[in-house]
């Protein structure tokens, strides 16, 4: 049950940020005209890079907090506010292309479209920041810190759920990137954005809940004095 709950929390929090459908539109625009084999090859490399990238960040999240002397409640309050703010911003986007444009503005690629040149960009910018940007890293750090609390068995299940969410989302990234051209013709941007708004509301609620969990601990420590 804990594994399933942690998976749902992580999946709901990361889905609007990684946004496989929206990122596929950006990916399609950056790659340009290319054979289907090129899309599949790049999609496979990006999905693998995304798993490794986020897994390393998950494992090092607690170490980073310990190194800087940051407590878990502080991370929960700060991370919860950031997550809620991201969810709120997605809810208030005016157009279906807004999320795509925000990602596309982060990086520009030159005119060279050779396969070798594209493969060299599999990690940067296709994995970071197009697929997993700074917001994704903040959420990973917050969830990693949250799941690291408690007994070892609960922490292990929490991190397992988080990693499973990363695997599922990376698989969705592979599928959406591999068939980006077909998907963009089958699903309208407005429909994809409507679905994203529902997920964004859930993300807003998750952020408020995480922030409240941290704030309640801090408040209790102050009242005990």
Image (cartoon, rainbow, N blue to C red):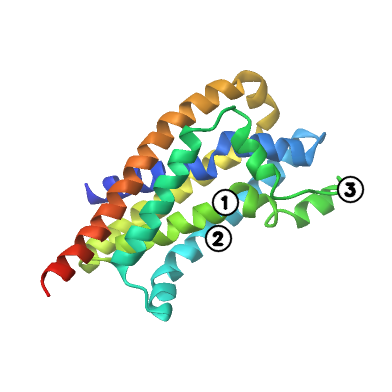
The answer to which of 45 and 220 lies nearer the viewer is: 220
Whether pointer 1 and pointer 2 mark residues with C-beta atoms closer than 8 Å, the reply is: yes
Q: What percent of the width, then of the height, locates residue 215?
A: 25, 59
Relative horizontal placement of residue 85, taking residue 127 as reference (left or right): left
Residue 181 can be seen, yes or no: yes
Q: Residues within 10 Å of mark 2 (few under 14, many from 20)?
A: some
What residue sits 67% from the left and 20% below the top? Answer: 185
Relative horizontal placement of residue 98, taking residue 76 as reference (left or right): right
- Mark with earlier residue (3, 2): 2
Q: What percent of the width, then of the height, locates residue 124?
A: 70, 57
Q: Residues within 10 Å of mark 1 (few under 14, many from 20)?
A: many
- Dot 1 falls on a residue whose secondary structure is loop
What residue sits 64% from the left and 44% below the top? Answer: 103
Please identify, in this view, whether the residue under mark 1 or under mark 2 is nearer the observer. Answer: 1
- Residue carrying label 1: 132
Q: What percent of the width, then of the height, locates residue 41?
A: 71, 45
- Dot 2 falls on a residue whose secondary structure is helix
Q: Residue furthest left?
A: 224
When asked about the image quadrant of residue 121, the answer is: bottom right
Q: Which mark is residue 112?
A: 3
- Disc 1 to disc 2, C-alpha distance: 9 Å
- Residue carrying label 2: 53
- Disc 3 to disc 1, C-alpha distance: 24 Å
From this view, report whether residue 49 is shown above or below residue 223: above
What residue sits 48% from the left and 31% below the top? Answer: 196
Q: Residues within 10 Å of mark 3 (few under 14, many from 20)?
A: few
When asked about the image quadrant of residue 200, the answer is: top left
Relative horizontal placement of residue 118, taking residue 21 as reference (left or right): right
From this view, report whether residue 221 is shown above or below residue 130: below
């Amino acid at each position: 049950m804990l594994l399933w709950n942690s998976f749902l929390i992580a999946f709901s929090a990361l889905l609007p940020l990684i946004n496989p459908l929206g990122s596929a539109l950006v990916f399609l625009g950056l790659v340009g005209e290319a054979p289907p084999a090129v899309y599949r090859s790049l999609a496979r490399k990006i999905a693998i890079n995304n798993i490794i990238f986020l897994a390393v960040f998950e494992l090092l999240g607690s170490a980073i907090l310990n190194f800087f002397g940051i407590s878990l409640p502080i991370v929960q309050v700060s991370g919860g506010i950031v997550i809620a703010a991201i969810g709120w911003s997605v809810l208030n986007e005016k157009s279906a292309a807004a999320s795509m444009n925000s990602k596309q503005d982060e990086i520009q690629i030159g005119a060279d479209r050779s396969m070798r040149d594209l493969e060299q960009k599999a990690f940067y910018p296709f994995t970071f920041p197009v697929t997993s940007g700074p917001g994704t890293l903040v959420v990973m750090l917050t969830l990693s810190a949250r799941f690291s609390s408690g007994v070892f068995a609960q922490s292990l299940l929490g991190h397992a759920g988080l990693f499973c969410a990363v695997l599922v989302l990376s698989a969705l990234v592979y599928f959406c990137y591999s068939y980006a051209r077909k998907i963009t013709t089958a699903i309208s941007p407005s429909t994809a954005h409507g679905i994203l708004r529902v997920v964004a509301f859930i993300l807003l609620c998750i952020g408020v809940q995480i922030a409240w969990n941290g704030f309640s601990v801090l408040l209790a420590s102050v009242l005990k004095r």
